[in-house]
Amino acid sequence: MDFHIGKKTLTRNSEPYLIAEIGLNHNADIEIGKRTIDKAKESGAHAVKFQTYRTEEFIDSKNPDVKFLFDIFKQYELNETLHREFQKTALDLGLDFFSTPLCNSAVDLLCDLDVPVFKIASGDIVNLPLLDKVIQTGKPILVSTGAALPEEVTRAISKFQKENVETCILHCVSMYPTPLEKVNLQSIPFYLDTTNYVVGFSDHTGGTIASAVAIGLGAVIIEKHFTLDRSLDGPDHTISMDPESFRKLAEETKQSFLMRGVYGKNTHAEETNGWFYGRRSLYKQNNSVLSLRPALHTKDKTVLDSWSLDLVGDPSRFPEGPIRLAPITK
């Protein structure tokens, strides 16, 4: 199943599609947000993604255990005006613009903005009310799988299949940053083998190697936290890539895609052109049979190649030199 983002069609063989996850890194400041979008474009991103919510609709403001979380999200809550400003900036630069809705009213706002896709956060892969709301829009869905149990991922996939939802599964590990030994990139070929979806990777590691390897394993979409400056105040700047690092990510994922090739053992003409010097034919020397270079059989089909030892029999039947198919008998 192909995956569509606006006018773009992504297949399992598409070149890497990079999402700069700005998230909260706009700091609810229009100038910081616009400059961050601009730098994402310069750094090689194809899309920018934000988070859309009304804090009171997804965090219990009366629970003291999550007051710190409520305060953080409230501080960086985006109103409709900022959404529209950031969307216009992105579209003017040729970037796709979309967001992660964290509550029902956010879905409504994003529909009003006519975003091309919805992104489901890892924590909401088990949030049936929100999933139902997003599914009803009929738009394609990117869904992260961080911290989800295998059966929870299977359950969500079954729902998407039943509802005939255009879906992209993003492998994800909800650790910030994710230690390399816990990235578990083998999940990518697992999703490719067990679904017909385009598969991606929401990368929370501290560098670029995991995303490059993910592309080599078949991922098409890469999502990475992005910031204008890692020293800015805010909860996510320090775990995000700055423009220089994102440019490196863009280059390395392109290189990884070029290295991926196609499924199976494929032999290039440039390789077979070297058979004459690298392979061997059978030769008789002092009544012994030796396997020697050059591989004369690649140019003279009467000469036996080194796999044809069983055809030789008694080597005394042959003159010194290359052994040919038509033996010379005494």
Image (cartoon, rainbow, N blue to C red):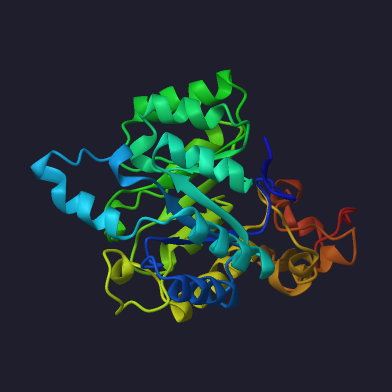
260 vs 86, nearest the viewer? 86
Q: Tally the marks.
A: 0
Position of residue 155 in the picture relative to residue 320 (left or right): left
Quarter of the figure with residue 160 = top right
238 vs 284, nearest the viewer? 238
Q: Residue at x 70, y 51 (%)?
A: 309
Q: Residue at x 50, y 21 (%)?
A: 159
The answer to whether residue 251 shows anywhere in this view is yes
Position of residue 111 in the picture relative to residue 202 (left or right): right
Q: Residue at x 21, y 38 (%)?
A: 60
Quarter of the figure with residue 192 = top right
274 vs 318, nearest the viewer? 274
Query: Residue 256's x, y, as percent?
Result: 57, 65
Q: Residue at x 52, y 32 (%)?
A: 134
Query: Residue 75's x, y, as percent?
Result: 28, 60
Residue lying furthest top in this view? 162
- On the rendered image, what quadrant is the N terminus found in? top right
Query: Residue 275's x, y, as percent?
Result: 76, 68
126 vs 133, nearest the viewer? 133
Position of residue 46 in the picture relative to residue 324 (left or right): left
- On the rendered image, what quadrant is the C terminus found in? bottom right
Please tell me whether residue 97 is drawn above or below residue 43 in the rendered image.
above
The answer to whether residue 320 shows anywhere in this view is no
Query: Residue 261's x, y, as percent?
Result: 66, 57
